[in-house]
Amino acid sequence: MSTATVSRVVHGLDGVRPSTRRRVLEVIEAMGFVPDSAAQSMVRGRKEVVGLVAIASRGPDTDIEQEGLLFIEEVLRGVESTLSPLGWPVLVSVRRSPDDAGAYPWLQKMSAKVDGLLIAEGIDEEHMTRLASRIPIVLISGSPDQPKADVVRSDNRAGIKAVVRHLIERHGRSRLFYVGGPAEAPDARERRAAFDEELARHPGARLAGSFEGWFVASSGQQAVREIVAARQLGGRAGEAPDAIVCANDQMAIGAMRELQAAGLRVPADMAVTGFDDIHLGALFAPPLTTVHQPMRLLGERACGLVLDRIADPTLPRRVELLPTELIVRESCGCPAAA
């Protein structure tokens, strides 16, 4: 019996007589043979690996090891829960910036090792088009206008609008300071646009200032330092912000820490809100009012889409929008839950 015949039986291919297949399987069972997964994937023309790419858009004074990538960690759990039943691993790679000259060659090398790519942020349209011509790609929290890749994202607009309405209508806050994420991040841009739109719908409220951060705690701290410095330079108490709306929880936690260090009370002197609903926010004092976005579900759905496209590259492009939810705790001024 030839090696080729045994290989065809092991990999479930046609062209083998039933009696021959039966004898081969009996021998495999008797010997306790385990087929080599790498060889099987080569026969099928697949690597059985999905890549997850994270761009750590960080400022020069932030440390990824200290700040962490809490959003990506949750997304990764969703990806792994989808791949685990298939026995497929996920190849994770984090790059500090999408803008340097080596970004595209790095993505090319990674694409050669996987069957599909999940990209969390930070690839321009030209590079996206080139990559998508050779491998299935799904963007996580990407722009819905990207024509060459599937997209899974959270409803940023509804989440931020709910926060602004709650602060103004429930608590009477009227001077809102906004701490945003990096301009190159699609979700950061969308959250800022929604904030401006909702604020404009309330004539009695206004923007008391803004700060463009990097989705890390130190950005919230720097924003508060600017607020405190303005107060100390003679700003009137009635002109200072009475609420800080942060585009993610890490910045909100940094803002609360800095407010407390400056002797300002949260929420009595200044309310603070976040976005994401990371576990740490619920443990902080006071617990953080925030917007829950389903980070694990983002990973699950993105992985599902890329697996679908690996199986059938001719599928039409898809964009999925996942719901967000306002999570009310004490940092906005609401009483503690019973």
Image (cartoon, helix red, strand yellow):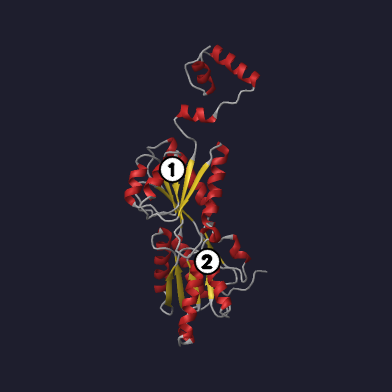
Residue 140, percent from left and from top: 45, 51
* On-image quarter of the C terminus: bottom right
Asked whether, in this view, residue 194 is left or right of residue 130, the answer is right
Where in the figure is residue 162, as x and y percent of width and height?
49, 67
Residue type at numbered disc 2 = Ala
Q: What number of labels is visible? A: 2
**Lower sequence index among marks 1 and 2:** 1
Residue 305 x %, y %: 46, 43
State whether residue 200 is above or below residue 40. below
Q: In the displayed orientation, state which residue is furthest to the right.
A: 338
Q: Which residue is mark 2?
A: 217
| Image location (x, y in percent) of residue 299 | 51, 49
Front residue (pair 103, 255): 103
Q: Is residue 127 found left or right of 254 in the rendered image?
A: left
| Residue drawn where x is 46% and y is 33% of the image | 46
Picture residue at 61% right of the left edge, 71% below the top:
286
User: Tag 1: residue type?
Assistant: Met
Q: Nearer the viewer, residue 329 or 130?
A: 130
In front of the other: 298 or 42: 42
* Image: 17 above or below 240: above
Residue at disc 1, secondary structure: helix
Task: Report if the CB atoms under discs 1 and 2 are less than 8 Å apart.
Answer: no
Which residue is nearer to you in this view: 67 or 187? Answer: 67
Classify 10 Å Cα crowding around label 1: few (below 14), some (14-19), many (20 and above). some
To which residue does mark 1 refer?
A: 110
